[in-house]
Amino acid sequence: MQTRPEVSSPRSANLGSAALARLLHPINLAVPAVAVAFYLLWQHHLIARIPYWTILATVLVAEAASIFAFAAWGEEHTGWRMWALVGVDLSVIGAVVYAIGWGPVFAIALIIGAADIMRRSGSAVMKPAIVFSCLVIGAGQGGIAIGLVPSLIRQPLAQGLAGLEAAALVITVALLGWFAIGRERAEAELVHRERRFSALVTNSADILIVTSAEGELRYTSPAFERLLGYPEAQVQGLTLAEFVHPGDVSSLEAATAAARDSRQVIVQEELRMRRADGEWLWFEAAFTDLVSDPDVNGIVANLRDITGRKDAEERLAHAALHDPLTGLPNRTLILDRAEQMLSRARRAHPYYPAAALFVDLDNFKDINDTLGHEAGDRFLQAVGQRLAGVLRASDTVGRLGGDEFVVLAEGLSVAAGPELVAQRIQDVLREPFRVEGWSGIPLMITASIGIACGDRASAQELLRDADIALYKAKAKGKSRCTLFEPAMQSAVLDRLSLEMDLRGALEAEQFFLVYQPVFDLDKVNICGVEALLRWQHPTRGVVAPDEFIPSLEESGLILEVGRWVLFQACRQAADWHRLGHRLIMSVNVSMRQLESDSFLEDLAEALSSNELDPGALVVEVTETTLMRDTEATIRRLHMLKKIGVLVAIDDFGTGYSSLAYLRQFPVDALKIDRSFVASMHDSAESTALVHTLVQLGRTLGLETLAEGIEEHWQLQNLQREHCERGQGFLFSRPLEPQAIEAFLSEHNALT
């Protein structure tokens, strides 16, 4: 008797060829040996004394049945065919053991057969194995009971042994089945994990690499080819270092060495690797030494593509150190380069000159206000490019913000003196600019430059001193360059102290108004006054408006102070009106006041609370203020006109307003700037310009007023041009209210 061998037979094979293949299997050579063994046992009366040919026939029929079942149903593991195969195999075993008379004892062979079937076919055969084993034992014992099956064991012992064999068989096969179920589940889980790991590795965006301890590539995941473009077959035998940037090879070697020194501890490093097309990609590499693991036997590297992150970091780093508008270095980078420049200068002292130049564009605000912020931005970009083009490659030009630039020059650039560098900058900026989108308008600009050179304790001090020198240059009249001197610092401290005092000046009632008379140039009669702000400082005395009004504008205090001026001027005009002096009161309004949401309410309240006729108040707005945001300005001016006040354009002729816009502005008067009046005697162009401005006013139905009349010839020229109003020192300096009243009384007495 023998068990069925593990030979697979395709279901589609012919029954005859399958049976022949089974018959010719080497295991069937044991059949003759079994026949001989049974014959010897039969001769010595060790098996049942039935005719030998009966035993031999049983063996041959059992083998034939096994061959037929295998050929017919193959290795079936489900359905009725599986039950049939199990039934045939166990029936063959049972037929042989019961035929030789030892059935109740050798029924244990059924357990061996069931175990063998379960080994080949799995836990699915557990139920048919138990069922057919019990059926075989039951059939055998039934045959013994009725005398059809021989037995060398007497009754009732044979029946008892058979019962014990059946119970043992059921328990043993069930245990084997449960063990098989557990093994199958474990194998299925292992297969699932292997497939999942394989799928993850295959579809992962990260590269998985296994190298030898020497760095030779042994395995590369599919992502290696996807990201770098190298097929796996092409890289076998090469080392990882051959794909790494030369500058990162030392980092790779250090990381792998650290991984080997600290077994199974992940060591991370950032590396650049070359793509097949020559491009370099950044990877975050994690190395783990698994050389001691027999399943891996190598160093595992997980590579994550961080090129996008590196690019973003580079852009952020550039943005952190560069001005977003011009692309020039910003304050942070300028300070760093200034520190480096000072360090080089100290090492080479005294033969290594170094300087910082602060460059401020004069009247850039006019361009921004008249042409708009977009044009201003384009203009600043053009200035940055022009500055960079005039300097050496070793020098630095940066933008601090607004219209302020800084230049760091050293060595040969300033060997002949930093003033020459400043002169080159001023010369190149004087050339007309043609900005994209405004090419029809050549823009002119000048620059004031502050220079600080020599050693300093820090870059901050160097830039501070250059800034102080710049302030001094602008105070001298702009378009100048000034070299820093230690005495300038005390002047700046005085200015800062003045600005601090300015914050409490209104509450301390230190501001007061003076009034400059406005005359009818035809009759030379006083017809109005212009309210002018003054500051009575407790220790400095009267501070000139040019010294504190810019600070009011920058700090925003102009809103509060401007409101006070408006109420004071209206109150004074109302008082004079009650005294019989019907003067027109003119008040200057800044850009920030005009843009304020509360300005119109303040104006209406100032008029109503003082019972002043709106027609007796003139709101003066500079030409550059009007052009800042023309659409919004026109709307606000119309609101002013609804209140009933008059509107005048101050400093007319100095801005960039066009005739088209002038027609849209609801204004009543044009004030000709004092610079044109002052140069009428010496400049034919100024005389012609004044004539043009007066005629323009007459054409548009606007009153014209000339500022800064200080000489009789100026008055005569203006009268010839039929300019209607005027003011200046020729008539009177600004006066306090009591002086104005005395001036009016004296003037009325003379007329």
Image (cartoon, rainbow, N blue to C red):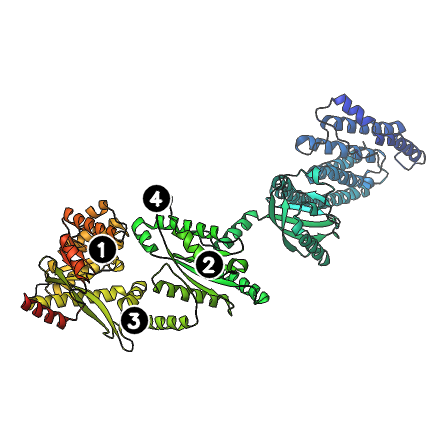
User: Which residue bears the numbered disc 2?
Assistant: 420
User: Which residue bears the numbered disc 1?
Assistant: 680
- Find the distance from the CA under tag 3 to the CA under tag 2: 38 Å
Residue kind at label 1, given as amino acid type: Met
Reading the chain from its start, which is encountered first: label 1 or label 3?
Answer: 3
> Which corner quadrant of the image does residue 9 belong to?
top right
User: Which residue bears the numbered disc 4?
Assistant: 438
For the point 76% across and 26% down, the residue is: 68
The N terminus appears in which quarter of the rendering? Answer: top right
Reading the chain from its start, which is encountered first: label 3 or label 2?
Answer: 2
Q: In what element is the residue under mark 2?
A: helix
| Residue 406 visible in the picture | no
The C terminus appears in which quarter of the rendering? Answer: bottom left
Contact flag, marks 4 and 3 (Cβ < 8 Å): no
Q: In what element is the residue under mark 1?
A: loop
- Find the distance from the CA under tag 1 to the CA under tag 4: 32 Å
Q: In what element is the residue under mark 4?
A: loop
- Mark closer to the observer (1, 3): 1
User: Which residue bears the numbered disc 3?
Assistant: 502
